[in-house]
């Protein structure tokens, strides 16, 4: 009898350990008025989510990696707990929030960058107020505009409405909705098209890897 109990306990443990955690996009995160007291930093947008404050703006820093729009994250005491690198000439740096379905203090930010077309997005994983840099998603979604039945223009567009994000066995998977065309490396000489079902990103806790099947 003891043998069967041990086997059953092992099976239950395996199922629990392998449970998939889905991250659901928050449709609306309200902007806030925030009195910024950070020296040398001027914010354009401010958000509050899960007791943290997120500021997007510019610093007076002349270090190349800090040029352009940056994301600052502050805790409940107003202390800076994270600073992103600058996004150079990107017209925008737009954070979108994805909440864990199982863990209330875990969520992911996918922050879009680009100019006339999408340059992809930067990913950040927040777990119990610890912030991990997921990496650069160097992709866009093909957008085609037709006029009078003819193709007027096409370009890589924002990816956030097309993502499916989950975590299993301490790996984060970022996949794309079916029947989309994903543009890899938009705006570069390596730009190419892939079916959305055939590619995804995997973060193993250290590195973000693009998987192409």
Image (cartoon, rainbow, N blue to C red):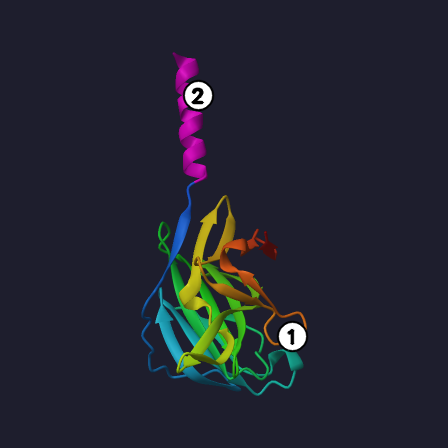
Which of 206/145 is in front?
Answer: 145
Q: Which residue is mark 2?
A: 7
The reply, left or right, for residue 143 in relation to residue 190 is left
* Vertical side of 8 occupied by 165: above or below: below
**Which residue is found at the position 58% from the left and 74% from the top?**
85
Labels 2 and 1: the sequence-earlier one: 2
Secondary structure type for disc 2: helix
Which of 59/190 is in front?
Answer: 190
Q: Which residue is mark 1?
A: 188
**Which residue is found at the position 44% from the left and 72% from the top?**
95
Q: Residues within 10 Å of mark 1 (few under 14, many from 20)?
A: few
Percent coordinates x, y for residue 141 in the rendering: 49, 69
Could you tell me if residue 79 is visible in this image?
A: no
Mark 2 vs 1: CB contact within 8 A: no
**Which residue is found at the position 35% from the left and 55% from the top?**
104
Percent coordinates x, y for residue 47 in the rendering: 37, 75
Decide whether the magenta segment is chiefly helix, strand or loop.
helix
Secondary structure type for disc 1: loop
Structural distance between the alpha carbons of marks 2 and 1? 54 Å
* Vertical side of 187 occupied by 52: above or below: above
Q: Is residue 21 magenta?
A: no
Image quadrant occupied by the N terminus: top left
Percent coordinates x, y for residue 34 in the rendering: 36, 81
**What span is colored magenta in the figure?**
1-18
**Which residue is found at the position 43% from the left and 20% from the top?**
6
The reply, left or right, for residue 43 in relation to residue 193 is left
Quarter of image, res 14: top left
């Amino acid at each position: 009898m003891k043998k069967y109990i041990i086997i059953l306990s092992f099976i239950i443990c395996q199922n629990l350990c392998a449970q998939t955690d889905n991250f659901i996009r928050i449709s609306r995160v309200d902007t806030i008025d925030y009195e910024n007291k950070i020296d040398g930093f001027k914010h354009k947008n401010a958000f509050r989510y899960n007791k943290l404050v997120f500021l997007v703006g510019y610093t007076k820093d002349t270090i190349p990696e800090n040029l352009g729009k940056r994301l600052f994250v502050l805790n409940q005491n107003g202390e800076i707990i994270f600073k992103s690198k600058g996004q150079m000439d990107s017209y925008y740096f737009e954070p979108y929030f994805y909440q864990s379905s199982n863990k209330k203090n875990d969520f992911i930010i996918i922050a879009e960058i680009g100019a006339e077309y999408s340059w992809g997005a930067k990913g950040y994983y927040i777990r119990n107020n610890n912030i991990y840099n997921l990496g650069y998603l160097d992709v866009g979604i093909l957008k085609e505009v037709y006029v009078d039945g003819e193709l007027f223009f096409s370009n890589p567009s924002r990816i956030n409405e097309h993502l499916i994000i989950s975590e299993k066995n301490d790996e984060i998977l970022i996949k794309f909705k079916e029947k989309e065309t994903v543009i890899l490396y938009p705006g570069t000489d390596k730009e190419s098209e892939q079916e959305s079902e055939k590619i995804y990103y995997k973060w193993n806790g250290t590195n973000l890897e693009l998987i192409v099947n």
